[in-house]
Image: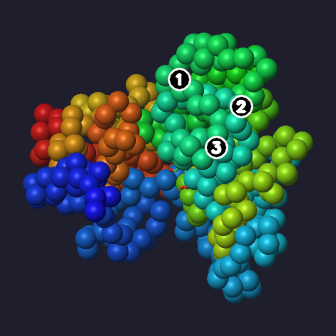
Amino acid sequence: MSDLFSKFDPLIELRETLLKSGVTDPFNLVMERVESPTVAICNGRRTILLGTYNYMGMTFDPDVVAAGKQALDEFGSGTTGSRVLNGTYVGHKAVEEALKDFYAMDHAMVFSTGYQANLGIISTIAGKDDYIILDIDSHASIYDGCALGNAQIVPFRHNDIEALDKRLKRMPPEAGKLVILEGVYSMLGDIAPLKEMVAVSKEAGAMVLVDEAHSMGFIGEHGRGVAEAQGVLDDVDFIIGTFSKSVGTVGGFCVSNHPKFEILRLVCRPYVFTASLPPSVVATAATSIRKLMDSADKRAHLWENSKRLHAGLRQLGFTLGTDEPQSAIIAVIMPDLEKGAAMWEALLNEGLYVNLARPPATPAGMTLLRCSLCALHSEEQVGEILGMFAAAGRATGCIS
Ligand SMILES: Cc1ncc(COP(=O)(O)O)c(C=O)c1O
């Protein structure tokens, strides 16, 4: 019998070598207690959280928590069914109404995760003779959505407008085309030139889907994302998003103005053949989304945090993923996995949690320490974070 697990041997070896060096497993951290969106207890000590996607700090919002508790009392712990059978409660309708109001769009469809939203929408709308043209650094859920469908997949170089234009011009003019972009790319925290990319896509007769997972709530005047900030929201056909980041719970969605959008509820398999979100989750999401509509002060504070951390890390001598802060994600580039893991652990020992990211999640084989800021990090906490980076950086030889 051949062992189907032998294909994982290189990864098992890499992991064992890393752990043998004595470092804490960076992919197995346990949060023993979570005190707030910015502080948890890990390994028995107070730890500042700089590696969550809790951008707008909604997880402990009293109204959000109260809405979840009330729904749990009134509707029970779960729906035990698909949206198209017994899994649509008033709460699912209410969160879709909240999304329509948030984006000022005609249709909203809620999935059980953002991953499933990409899986479902992409595989359903792009069929056998259609083309999907996507940024090569797209999220795994976008690639998996492509793999689940039957369209021809054409990647182009990250954020390269000319490369996108060239690919589009080479395609049969009458073919169905879906261009897939992200507002913020979550590894380096850079944003897409959506204005130009949407323009060349529309000129070629393509439909456009933008995943705004990492920009919802924060970027754009109303927090609608990079498409809003760059003035092209009306030209985007589908926005994909998640409740697991700024919204502060779990779930995914697609919003659109397409007049035939509602038919997707009957033909989209990752929507039909899975259980719907629990009532408490949709209640927290709806409350959070409505509060995010009125969060301009928090957005402004988050930008301040992002600028402060970016400038401070640069001053300390770290190499960062972007020249200027473009989002709430600031990536610190590490020379290799060993140094990255040592620095990650040194930060944890200082009382700071960040994400250690490595290929295949990262582009160009990079090892990154990914910092994601929260609107509830105080100015003092950002100062503390910089002090921890200075100490850990010197202890590991990452900076002098
Ligand atoms: C760009 C992007 N799209 C989709 C997702 C999936 O979101 P969810 O956590 O809701 O499955 C993520 C999650 O990290 C993401 O970064």
Q: Residue at x 60, y 47 (%)?
A: 148
Q: Position of residue 93 (x, y in %)?
A: 81, 65
Give the vertical position of 166 relative to 195 (above or below): above
The residue carrying mark 1 has its beta carbon less than 8 Å from ligand 1 = no
Location of mark 3 (residue) = 149
Q: Earlier in the sequence, mark 3 or mark 1?
A: 3
Q: To which quarter of the image does residue 169 belong?
A: top right
11 relative position to 400: left or right: right
Q: Select label 3 or label 1 by which is in front.
A: 3
Q: Residue at x 64, y 62 (%)?
A: 112
Q: CA distance from mark 3 to mark 1?
A: 19 Å
Q: Earlier in the sequence, mark 2 or mark 1?
A: 2
Q: Please, what secondary structure does the residue beneath circle 2 have?
A: loop
Comparing 217 with 204, the one in front is 204
Comparing 385 with 368, the one in front is 368
363 relative position to 367: left or right: right
Q: Residues within 10 Å of mark 1 (few under 14, many from 20)?
A: some
Comparing 61 with 159, the one in front is 159
46 relative position to 185: left or right: left
Q: Earlier in the sequence, mark 2 or mark 3?
A: 2
Label disc, if present, on residue 129 of the rendered structure:
2
Q: To which quarter of the image does residue 45 belong?
A: bottom left
State the residue lying farthest toward the right.
259
Location of mark 1 (residue) = 156
Q: Which quadrant is home to the N terminus?
A: bottom left
Q: Check disc 2 and give the amino acid type.
A: Asp
Q: Residues within 10 Å of mark 2 (few under 14, many from 20)?
A: few
Q: Please, what secondary structure does the residue beneath circle 1 have?
A: strand
Give the vertical position of 36 relative to 55 (above or below): below
Q: CA distance from mark 2 to mark 1?
A: 19 Å
Q: Please, what secondary structure does the residue beneath circle 3 have?
A: loop
